[in-house]
Image: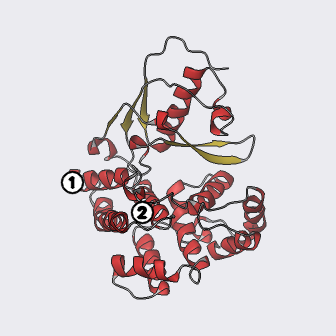
Amino acid sequence: MPVNNNIDVIVAVGGGSVIDSAKITALAIANNTDPWAIMKYKFKPQTTIPLIAVLTLAATGTEMNGAAVLQNHETNEKIGYVSSLNYPKHSFLDPEFTYTVPKDYTAYGVVDLIAHALEDYFGEGDASLSDRFVEVIIKEAMEYGPFVLKEPQNYEYRANIMWAATTALNGLTNYGRKNGDWGVHDIGHNISYLYDTPHGATLSIAYPAWLKLHKDRISERITKLGKQLFGTNSVDETIENLEKFFKSIDSPIRLSEINILENKREDITAQMLKNKINGMVHEFSDDDRKKIVELMM
């Protein structure tokens, strides 16, 4: 069991994984309980230790939200936990701290922030202003993402991507909605768990597949998104342009591009079925869980 050795504050220096781990560590120590009891909502924390976040990767938005994602190799899970106690007391966002982030992980951060905005866009509730927030955040990412990859030590480019990543998951895009969907993240988390794949890379693979699965179910919504982002007028054009953008920043759009080949299909499908991957709004059947793997190959 955790023991509080008179810890007054926790300082987390890193990206999403580091800060998320620190959030749950703070809860576990303050409440003297097992962190996985917290993650599984078996224990409700009443207090926490103040957390200071020093961000070194623009991607997850964890610096300004109450969410944390951890993975457990004993239970074969990668899951999230949300609590208002998880908000950092202060976060330092200095774009210069991201200058040395490699090109691929910079691109994955851009994908991650786009995916966060989309999860709310496909959530439950009609919120036209929040839709516009989503659209401009994604446009910002698509404009400055390619620039920051070409000039990784450009302060303005790094700053714009950093702020876009924060606003993509600080609640701004969720106002007026009951909740986001988060089905794509569930898919991505399971792939990351199986193959230690970077989170953003799983999302650039999973999102086009998810859109293809739902193209006949929410065609109007997808078409609206494409019109605002790309000036297109169909579901297929929307998906095609999103894939083109991901490819333009060298983020994969198929599992085969990260050397996860057909011989892994059965394992991935079994993982998806075992953990019952699902969205909060657009739910999956078992047939959907099998189909999504096919669409990602």
Q: Secondary structure at mark 2?
A: helix
Q: Nearer the viewer, mark 2 or mark 1?
A: 2
Check the image and tell me how it is coloured: secondary structure
Instruction: In the rendered view, tell whether residue 47 sits above or below residue 182.
Output: above
Relative placement, left or right, of 205 versus 60 is right
> How many tags in the picture?
2
- Circles 2 and 1: CB atoms closer than 8 Å: no
Relative placement, left or right, of 267 versus 116 is right
**Which of the 4 quarters of the picture holds residue 105?**
bottom left
For badge 2, the amino acid type reads Ile
User: Measuring 64% from the left and 48% from the top, which residue is drawn there?
Assistant: 78
User: Measuring 36% from the left and 69% from the top, which residue is drawn there?
Assistant: 128
Residue 204 position, x and y percent, is: 51, 66
Instruction: In the rendered view, tell whether residue 142 sits above or below residue 191.
Output: below
Label 2 packing within 10 angstroms: few (<14), some (14-19), many (20+): many
Instruction: In the rendered view, tell whether residue 133 sits above or below residue 209.
Output: above
The residue tagged 2 is 114
Return the residue found at the far bottom. Answer: 233
For badge 1, the amino acid type reads Glu
The residue tagged 1 is 156
Residue 221 position, x and y percent, is: 47, 77
Q: Nearer the viewer, residue 214 or 247?
A: 214
Q: If the image is split into quadrants, where does the C terminus sit?
A: bottom right
Residue 76 position, x and y percent, is: 73, 47
Return the residue found at the far top. Answer: 6
Q: Nearer the viewer, residue 145 or 123?
A: 123
Instruction: In the rendered view, tell whether residue 147 sits above or below residue 40.
Output: below
Instruction: Kindly identify which numbered label has been placed on residue 203.
Output: none
Q: Secondary structure at mark 1?
A: helix
Q: If the image is split into quadrants, where does the N terminus sit?
A: top right
